[in-house]
Image: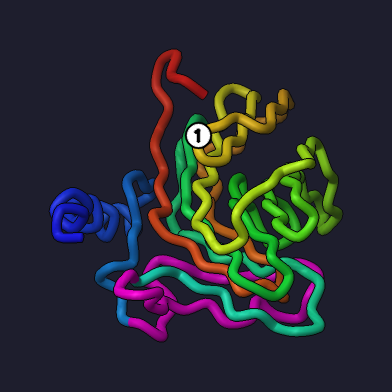
Amino acid sequence: MAARARVILPAIAICAVSLTAAQTTGTLTFDQVATGTLPPGFTTSALRQPDPGLWTVVRIGTNPVLHHAPTPGTDGWSLALTDATVPARFRLTARVRLASGRRAGGLVWHYLDARNFMAVMLDLEDGDIELFRVTDGNRIRLEDRDGLDLDGNAWHTLRVSHDEGKTTVSIGGIRVLDQNERRSSTAGRRVGVVAHGAADASFDDVRVDPLTGRQDR
């Protein structure tokens, strides 16, 4: 644990500064955020439900993480977003744990507002992962992969890379989805994480990296 702290604490300091700037890169681990609060530089929103529910930093063991508390009876999405924006070409990574309730959650990018964004949702109950474009509040499924057999008690690393109209999604370093979609520039839009409204979901090590040259997508 001590070795982990030595590696990532510099990244925390960098990200704390970057989140107040026009763009953000680096890793956000929530290690220096008070429990019971929403991290500085984050806001919440909701799709197809009255409100985003409760997002706070909690401890799982000794590790502080961003947690979404389930709201029974809801069937929409709850989002937690960085206030900063990212480059047009980027890689977004986060660890997610879907402990109970409606075990579905994932990543958000190209966020313009609560009715317009891109998302990938890992659903442990159905054993699938789906790529969505949300336009004017309508969820359009672009791609999906079923038959996933993942440990429901484990942390899973999700990654999205977006580069010149090509979007790729991986779980634990294994590519599972590819989508080509030439659309107008979305540079400067926000990123974040998403949970089903009834999901007990936790997120950690949220990281944004700019893509340069012909990097692996």
Total marks shown come to 1
**Closer to the camera in the image, 198 or 186:** 198
* Quadrant in the picture for residue 30: bottom left
Q: Name the residue under label 1.
A: 173
Q: Where is residue 51 in the image (x, y as percent from the top left)?
A: 69, 80
Q: Which of 178 and 137 is in front in this view?
A: 178
Picture quadrant where residue 199 is located? bottom right
Q: Position of residue 205 (x, y in %)?
A: 38, 54
Residue at image position (76%, 60%) is: 125
Decide which of 78, 126 is in the foreground and name it. 126
Whether the magenta-drawn stretch holds residue 54 is answered as yes
Q: Is 194 on the left or on the right of 94, as rendered?
A: right
Q: In this view, does 70 lie above or below 202?
A: below
For image coordinates 52% across by 58% down, the residue present is: 154
**Is residue 122 rendered to the left or right of residue 213?**
right
Which of the colour schemes (rainbow, by chain, secondary structure, one colour) is used? rainbow
Q: Does the magenta stretch include residue 176?
A: no
Q: Is residue 55 left or right of residue 15?
A: right
Looking at the image, residue 212 lies above or below residue 82: above
Percent x, y of residue 33: 30, 74
Q: Which amino acid does label 1 sit on?
A: Gly
Tag 1 secondary structure? loop
Please state, as top left, top right, bottom left or bottom right, where the N terminus lies in the image.
Answer: bottom left
Which residue shows up at 21% across the image and 54% down it? Answer: 4
Q: Give the range drawn in magenta.
A: 35-63
Q: Where is residue 103 in the image (x, y as percent from the top left)?
A: 69, 65
Dot 1 alpha-carbon crowd within 10 angstroms: few under 14, some 14 to 19, many 20 or more? few
Give the vertical position of 132 relative to 99 (above or below). Answer: above
